[in-house]
Image (tube, helix red, strand yellow):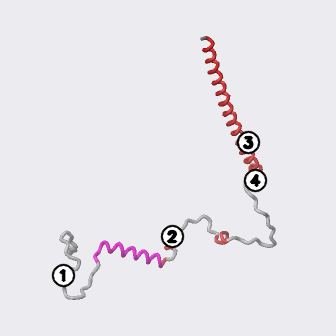
Amino acid sequence: MDDLESHEVDDEEEDSESGGDSENEFYNQAEKLRAAKRASKNATYSSNSSKSAVPSLPEDTVDGKRYITSQMSKNRGLTRSRNKNKKNPRKNYKLKHQKALRNRKGQVQAIRSQSAPYGGESTGINAAISRSVRFKN
């Protein structure tokens, strides 16, 4: 019986050792892959850092004066964007007037001209609304 128990213990030790080796191999392989990845990143970034950070434009030698860009000719600098409707004062006043008319339509009822003899209220009578205007003393 002792022989059987010793064989069982040996089998368990072999399983744990072989399992441990496979785990160690897996971790070692993962470490190698990570180290290779880091080395490749270091190589790419180190080559970029050795070059200048700002790419230089090719230097063209031009005889005489250099031409300017449209942005330079406008010379606006940092100006805020403005509303297109506010540029022309006539249009601005026209829009203000239209807005005032819209606001007034909500306050005052439009006058309707009489086209025929009285034929009753065209819109009907609403008893809940009183649109009378009080006279001042």
Compared with 8, 37 (above or below) is below
Mark 4 is on which residue type? Ser
Residue 39's disc is: 3
Q: Which residues are magenta?
A: 90-109
Query: What whole-number distance in Å separates the C-alpha atoms at marks 4 and 2?
Result: 42 Å
Q: Secondary structure at mark 4?
A: loop
Nearer to us in this view, 137 or 61: 61
Q: Residue at x 51, y 72 (%)?
A: 84
- Residue 5 in the figure: left or right of residue 122: right
- Please tell me which of labels 1 and 2 falls first in the chain: 2
* Disc number lying in front (1 or 2): 1
Q: Residue at x 73, y 56 (%)?
A: 54
The part of the image, by quadrant, that contains residue 6 is top right
The part of the image, by quadrant, that contains residue 26 is top right
- Please tell me which of labels 3 and 2 falls first in the chain: 3
Q: Which residue is mark 1?
A: 120
Mark 3 is on which residue type? Ala
Looking at the image, do the residues carrying marks 4 and 2 touch, with CB atoms under 8 Å apart? no
Query: What whole-number distance in Å separates the C-alpha atoms at marks 3 and 2?
Result: 55 Å
